[in-house]
Image (cartoon, rainbow, N blue to C red):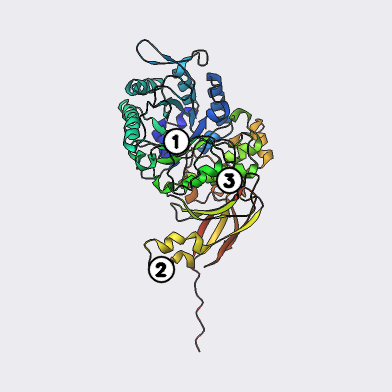
Amino acid sequence: MVATLFFGIAAVTALLASSAVAASYNGLAVTPQMGWDNWNAFACDVSEDLLLGTAQKMVDYGLRDLGYYYVILDDCWSVGRSSNGALMPNMTKFPNGMGHVAGQIHGMGLGFGMYSSAGTYTCGQYAGSLGYERQDAQTFADWGVDYLKYDNCYNEGQSGTPLITYNRYKNMSEALNATGRPILYSMCNWGEDYPWKWAQTMANSWRMSGDIYDSFDRPDERCPCSGDEGYNCALPGFHCSVMNILNKMAAIQSKSQSGAWNDMDMLEVGNAGMTDHEYKLHFSMWAMMRSPLIMGTDVRAMDAQTLSIYSNPAVIAINQDPAGNAPIRNWRYYVNATDEYGQGEISLWTNSLSNGDHVVALVNAGNTPMTMNATLTDIFFDQSSTGSKGPSSLLQQAWDVYDLWANRMDNATADAILTGNITSNAITDANSTMRYNATKTSYADGLAVNHTALMGSLVAPIAPMGTLTANVARHGVGLFRLRSRGVPSMRRRDEL
């Protein structure tokens, strides 16, 4: 049976990060959670059929086997409270009740997520959980819920300082734990009152910005902060672009840790507002930043390009690396090649991985294709400056370079999966360059044996003290895994 592949959330967490040591307050989200949420594509247009149909496609398309585990029902599912105060689902939208939905999703080997708000009402003006934390947490547990997204609307003014907001969200954290059911706790307070300073001991993730929308870099007055404030944003807002959210991460990325992640919001890939290169950059940088990877499109209607982006195991492996190390932005420069919104910049981001590899992202948010360069001195700046006694030995090593998008699934294969002409499992094996099954072999274990689907394609190496050079598309990214060849041996001179 499919269900035997997944034995609860804790087992899935262990599956995705077999060697990780959890710092998680509840043992969950040892690596960033993955799944699907309906909000970006459907908002309040939710139903039992939508959830179960999406869950089935996640199985059919191989997305579950890549690690997309949670099927999350967002706002607008309730009709209020019963006479005893219990939350009641809309029986028109969910005629068989939430327990049935959870059971069906569990039967497909997936987890079930739900939504509420730490306020009197949810953002859609349905009943919120403020003051009902214990009762609602038990209701969710009784329904078989595995994940709670907990929003911030109508909070009755209980915000404005970190301690006030901490206590409000702590109430639900304690209530969920008291049920005895493992429930991943995803705070959605939009970065208000600096959750990255205090949420690590009571939540598995926290939103660090206002809501995303399907735009690469268009500024919007409803998202008034850009990240250049050194992250001191009094009004997180909404309608925040991909580049807006990415740049906000530069100052706070070190606050993530295993079991407690900065959440950059749901992925917009597939919603038609960006180009293919922009969506690749969006997916790549969310993965590299260790953000939860929550699909936000209509999975049932996705096209080949969308499936191939969400299905890139070489990129997902970066996100699911068990070390959970924080990436850094090594440099950022504004460029003259600006787009119609007056935006244009390039940047270098790097990170170290658990097996000694490193990941490098060359981000071209300029308006023209560019040849971009990063020296080893750029890439290993921290190793040579922070607590070091001189240039790092990493600069003296030669490095193999793997392009993590070079083996992207081709459209013909993706179309064949989408139409059911071939199954995902039919092209998932030890020699596959583009498909992977993390339910059989964790990403960490796959990398330990150099599984081809996780490595990308080998390109030109970097010599000691050398430079990585890549041609990067307009609004695109070059994403690379670096693996050391070691320090080249010196040839001994012949004796006279």
* Closest to the observer, 183 or 285: 285
Q: Which residue is mark 3?
A: 281
Q: Mark 3 or mark 2: which comes first in sequence?
A: 3
Residue pushed farthest right? Answer: 412
Disc number placed over residue 390 in the picture, else none: 2
Q: Which residue is mark 1?
A: 190
Q: Nearer the viewer, mark 2 or mark 1?
A: 1
* Closest to the observer, 331 or 157: 157
Eyeballing the image, is 137 above or below 334?
above
Report the Cα–Cα distance between label 3 and label 1: 22 Å
Q: Mark 3 or mark 1: which comes first in sequence?
A: 1
| Three-letter amino acid code of the residue under disc 1 | Trp
Could you tell me residue 435's position as x and y percent? Answer: 58, 42
Callout 3 crowding tier (Cα within 10 Å): few <14, some 14–19, many ≥20: many
Write the residue at 62% across / 44% down: 341
Mark 1: which secondary structure?
loop
Verify CB contact (< 8 Å) between mark 3 and mark 2. Answer: no
Verify CB contact (< 8 Å) between mark 2 and mark 1. Answer: no
Write the residue at 54% across / 21% down: 46
* Closest to the observer, 292 or 400: 292
* Closest to the observer, 116 or 433: 116
Mark 3: which secondary structure?
helix
Report the Cα–Cα distance between label 2 and label 1: 40 Å
| Three-letter amino acid code of the residue under disc 3 | Leu
